[in-house]
Amino acid sequence: MNPEVIITNLHKRYTGVSGTINALLPVQSRHLCIGFVGTDIPGAGLAEIAQPENFIKLSLWQAIQLSRKKLPNGRKRIWHVRRDPEMIIALFLRDVLRFPIHITFTSAAKHRHSWFPRWLISRMDAVIATTPEAAAFVPNTTQVVFHGASLDRFAPPQDKHTIWQQSGLPGRYGIGMFGRIRPSKGTDIFVDAMLRVLPDFPDFTGVICGLCQPSEHAYQQTMLDKIAALGLSDRLVFLGDLPLDDIPKWYRNVTMMVACPRYEPFGITPLEAMASGCAVIASRTGAFEHIVKQGETGLLIPTHDVDALVSALRELLSDPAQAVAMGMHGRERVATHFSIEQEAAGIQSVYAQLQ
């Protein structure tokens, strides 16, 4: 097999970038021969490759050896990289060893890069920005391609009004927060707001799904102590770092999802939630203002604002039917504008410009 595109994921820990690659590989391999280099991605992803003849797992050395020559059709192979070390490796191959490759980089950061990453990015053959805001910080952006969500992996249940009963937790409806437990993700903002609204809405229970690194244990413990002090430990629950295959189930279980980070480059969780039929309350950071249609698929609030989150929660908790309707509209919005197939097609159009 002679892959047209080599996709790298050299970070050992599972991150948002890993999740993006995980979702894209099965879709990209429907149309291109893909070589994947790097850390094995757990859960759904590699196991879902529909055309295994179009996909091969390579060591970095194997990818380098393959890239010494052009493809049989005379075209240059494409390396798609997403981190600084991966750019360095690809640039060394192309500019020092003179390998016949094109390099594509995806940029999500919504801030000015330091001088060295800026220089690396300036040397790319193509740059994909995940939002117009990210593109504004990368003068050589080729195209803006929004991230997408899998409508197969993330799908709503038959009845959002009754699905919470399968969770084993109190109440009739669930509110979820998904992602790492840390201050930048606003976990404490979510907890503080929930502690103010839960006593008035006994039909609702909140869950927080995500990894807490050892460095954030004290941060999490402070929140657990607050929850226990108000006697709400059974109604605001940290589920921990769930297996990847369990996460779609919890999106299906909850009626609404909150994403209130203080800063986010993009933020995929609202898309996954909307694909699962959830109403979304999101702070105005990342790509959330592009994703969430105010009043139709959810509500947008300022960052760092507990009071605004309390107000938004009260609006939706007071009318679960409205939240369910928003979730239905959210699913339609993802299907129309933010599917993983649309993301893959956008990336492939950038590859095509390099041929």
Image: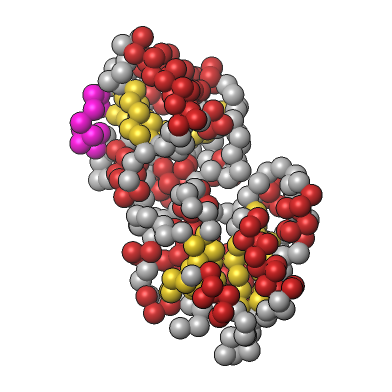
Q: Position of residue 133 (x, y in %)?
A: 69, 46
Q: Is residue 95 positioned above or below 188 on the image?
A: below
Report whether 104 appears left or right of 225: right
Viewer-proximal residue among 190 and 295: 190
Q: Is residue 163 magenta?
A: yes
Viewer-proximal residue among 98 and 79: 98
Q: Position of residue 199 (x, y in %)?
A: 34, 12
Viewer-proximal residue among 82 and 280: 82
Q: Is residue 184 magenta?
A: no
Residue 191 showing in the rendered view: no
Residue under the image location 70 percent in, 69 percent down: 92
Q: What residue range appears in magenta?
A: 162-172
Report whether 98 appears left or right of 80: right
Q: Is residue 166 positioned above or below 131 on the image?
A: above
Residue 19 showing in the rendered view: yes
Q: Position of residue 201 (x, y in %)?
A: 33, 17
Q: Position of residue 299 (x, y in %)?
A: 51, 32
Residue under the image location 33 percent in, 26 percent down: 237
Q: Is residue 337 positioned above or below 288 on the image?
A: below
